[in-house]
Image (tube, rainbow, N blue to C red):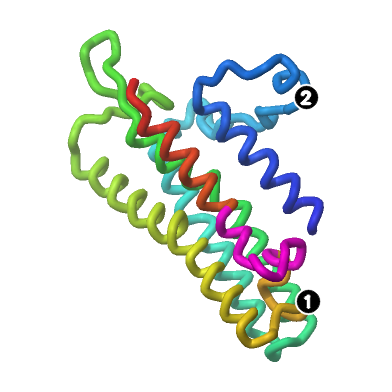
Amino acid sequence: MVRLKVLSTFFQVSEITTLINIQWPKIVLMTLPFQLPISDSKCLASGSGWNLQHTVYAYIWLPFVVFLAVLQQARKHPAKSPKRLKFSSTLIFLMTLYYAPVLKTIASIFECIEDAHGDLVILADPSVSCETSSSRTLLQIQGILTAILVGVGFPLYVVFKTTTLKSKGALDAHSHFSSLFQWYSPEVPYFEALHMLRKAALIAAAFLRPQ
């Protein structure tokens, strides 16, 4: 679990970094694998009419279904039991994996360009129009709310829970949040939240930069 957590953080930050055009030193280019070999969902669903809008909805809603299922399993077991700790730790781990990809996907729906015909389209998927419509407005509202809830809310929740546990002297391996703080200094148990906010800031900088 720990190795997966470290690797996921590394790969997420590495891929996000490529969103910003930086002239990296050759030593960096030779040593860091910036892109993961994962096909885009549009390619996987080629010919089915799938586009970026479907991808955004999938990124927003499908993981929440999984999170609720894991949470429900955790609640079936007594507090502090090994089974409950296992499910709770798994939920926290899945949410940290979910953090950067969903923010990156949501940010992409706001990055528009003008195509050859003079129409505004989404840069990441030119088949999707940027023109104002009820469906696009609904998509943007859901994206913004999810970005606030996940991008800001989750790190703040981690800060609150870890600092509360510290004040109660409960920062131990039996905590549901142990995977988030057990490898950091006891003085900064919330440091994982800073990692997440750093990812969010990097994504915002990449997509809000002047074209």
Query: Which stretch did the figure color magenta?
Result: 180-194
Most foreground residue, 86 or 50: 86
Most foreground residue, 21 or 86: 21
| Residue corresponding to mark 2 | 31
Residue located farthest toward the front when viewing the structure as drawn: 187
Q: Quadrant of the N terminus?
A: bottom right
| Residue corresponding to mark 1 | 173
Check if residue 6 falls in the magenta segment.
Answer: no
Image: 25 above or below 50: above
Image: 64 above or below 174: above
Most foreground residue, 59 or 167: 167
Q: Secondary structure at mark 2?
A: helix
Compute the Cα span from label 1 to label 2.
34 Å
Residue drawn at the location 71% of the way across and 78% of the way down: 171
Q: Amino acid at mark 2?
A: Thr
- Going from N to C along the chain, the mark reached first, 1 or 2, is 2
Q: Residue 129, located in which quarter of the rendered image? A: top left
Image: 16 above or below 173: above
In this rendering, does residue 123 appear at all?
yes
In this rendering, does residue 55 appear at all?
no
Residue located farthest toward the top when viewing the structure as drawn: 116
Check if residue 191 falls in the magenta segment.
Answer: yes
Magenta segment main secondary structure: loop
| Place of residue 125 in the rendered image (x, y in percent of width and height, measured from the top left) | 41, 26
Residue drawn at the location 76% of the way across and 62% of the way down: 183
Q: Residue 28, located in which quarter of the rendered image? A: top right
Residue drawn at the location 51% of the way across and 20% of the way down: 21
| Place of residue 127 in the rendered image (x, y in percent of width and height, measured from the top left) | 36, 24
| Place of residue 133 in the rendered image (x, y in percent of width and height, measured from the top left) | 19, 38
Q: Amino acid at mark 1?
A: Ala
